[in-house]
Amino acid sequence: MTPKTLSLAAAVLGLAVVLVVGLVQLGRSTPPPAPAPAHLTLAQMRAGLSGSAPPLASLHAQAGEVLSGGLPALRARLAALRGEPIVVNKWASWCQPCRSEFGVFQRVSLAEGRAVAFLGIDSEEPNRADAVSFLRSFPVSYPSYYDKSGQAGVAITDSSSTPVTVFYDRSGRIYIHQGPYPSVAKLEEDVRRYALGA
């Protein structure tokens, strides 16, 4: 072999070693864990939110329920809540990013539920029983509207993606957040900024 060929072979071998080491390191890295379930019960959430103003108390009374009526019922509920800060979260039990943020919504809806109306849209869920089962194991302090077709989800969030969260301030201004919330702090920050205008 000539010195030039040896030099080229050494370079190729060095590149191969770098690639192998990189792949081994990549294989060892693990994705960050999903937020741990908060393990709050409906009774604990209702107790923590007792004494809320009537429009919000009516939501807490339906905590963890999957309501029928689709888009017309959801629009009627939003109209009844006009003037209140509102957070609407579009989710589905089959959506892993949605499931990973449920602990965040459970905590924040309890912390902010006396001042902010929370609602869910169970969007493009083939079987309503799947959503009901999921909410039994992981309840939240507000109801969700069943949206098998996805029509309500797209109409309210202006997106076919899931999860999506929509914030309404008291004057009806809207802010739409695409994707899951990774932490209680981030969702609380957006609730204060976009729903409460703080």
Image (cartoon, grey):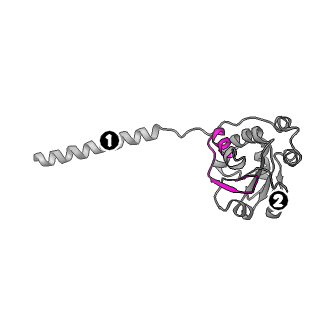
Q: Identify the residue under disc 1.
A: 18
Residue lying at the far left of the rendered structure: 2
Distance, label 2 to label 1, CA atoms, is 60 Å
Category of crowding for the residue at label 1, using alpha-carbon neighbours closer than 10 angstroms: few (below 14), some (14–19), many (at least 20):
few
Of tags 2 and 1, the one toward the viewer is: 2
Name the spot of residue 65 as percent of width and height, x first.
Answer: 83, 49
Q: Residue at x 46, y 37 (%)?
A: 28
**What amino acid type is highlighted by mark number 2?**
Ala
Q: Identify the residue under disc 2.
A: 79
Total marks placed:
2
Report whether residue 103 is seen: yes
Q: Residue at x 80, y 59 (%)?
A: 74
Describe the element under mark 2 as helix, strand or loop.
Answer: helix
Name the spot of residue 53 as percent of width and height, x first.
Answer: 87, 44
Residue toward you, 70 or 31: 70
Image position of 56 with respect to 146: above or below: above
Report whether residue 90 is seen: no
Q: Residue at x 80, y 51 (%)?
A: 84
Name the spot of residue 110 as percent of width and height, x first.
Answer: 77, 39
- Marked residue nearer the N-terminal end (2 or 1): 1
Describe the element under mark 1 as helix, strand or loop.
Answer: helix
Magenta segment range? 166-190
